[in-house]
Image (spheres, helix red, strand yellow):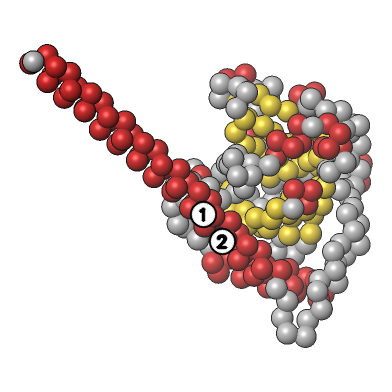
Amino acid sequence: MFKQKLSTIFVGIIVVLFAIIGVYAIGSLCKYYYESQFNKDQNQKLWEQFHETKPGQDPIPTPVPGNTDPIDDDTKAWLKDKYDEMKSINSDYAFWLNLIALEQEYPVCFSKEGDEYYYLLHDFYGNENKNGCIYMSANCNIRSENFILYGHCMHTGQMFGSLHKYLDAEWAKNNRLICIYMEDEYRYYEVISVFTCDMSAKPFNWERYTDFTSPGLGIRYGQMAVDASTIDFGYTPGKYADRFITLVTCEYTHNDGRLIVVARELGRPTVEEVDWSDYD
């Protein structure tokens, strides 16, 4: 009788524990999807604000990738207005990122001073959110020749959650364009390298290559990116004084995996045409 009662109590405890675990799991799942939807709504609001034109103002024409002609005064004024708008919301704002093929656009922040990983768990408005915000490496500044950007690989596809599409060679070769909107210019980039790695066995340390004080450093970075790439994009380092953008997110086929997408800026002059004293 005593054993039967003890057994009943034990079963009851197990049932209660499973119920608690179940409630916690459901609550965590609901919170995850709530934050994801909240983040999606916020990004949509930011997109609308960024692309909004003033009354009577014509939509700003999309620039031609690689076109090195100076942009007109109206476009410059529009870019400056949008930069100031985003900067007024968040003083850490750096520029606007357009992942053209993925049909996703995000504001990019500088790393928070004193807390490089702040934007892993905070959105553009400073709210706590597991989706975070796209942010730039603390080693970068607005003059860097290589912008290294970090973002979460969200299962919903938000942030850098859709970058895995670049692992498909055929898709990647046909969807190479990335654009950023800065305070006073557009920049177009084309993808030249895609690879995954374990953080304990990186093919090279991209964090070391943010500012190129000589043509050789840029060429070296381009060559390392090409050597690591699982896809041949036909890019040959060394012809142009390239600037790069490097996108980094988590990847789950490795123990501590990363997916890296490297792109070079279009319209750059040849190495011989660059006065490198400007970079001293």
Q: Are marks 1 and 2 in contact (CB under 8 Å)?
A: yes
Question: In the image, is residue 38 above or below residue 30?
Answer: below
Q: Quadrant of residue 196?
A: top right
Q: Give the quadrant of residue 229.
A: top right
Q: Give whichever of discs 1 and 2 has the lower sequence position.
A: 2
Count of numbered tags: 2
The residue at 73%/59% (across/down) is 181
Tell whether 38 sits left or right of 136: left
Q: Please indicate whether residue 219 sits to the left or right of residue 140 in the image.
A: right
Indicate the quadrant where residue 243 lies. Answer: top right
Q: Secondary structure at mark 2?
A: helix
Quarter of the image with the C terminus in it:
top right
Q: Amino acid at mark 2?
A: Gln
Q: What crowding class fits label 2: few (fewer than 14 Cα within 10 Å), some (14-19), or many (20 or more)?
A: some
Residue 42: mark: 2
- Disc 1 secondary structure class: loop
User: Which residue corresponds to mark 1?
Assistant: 123
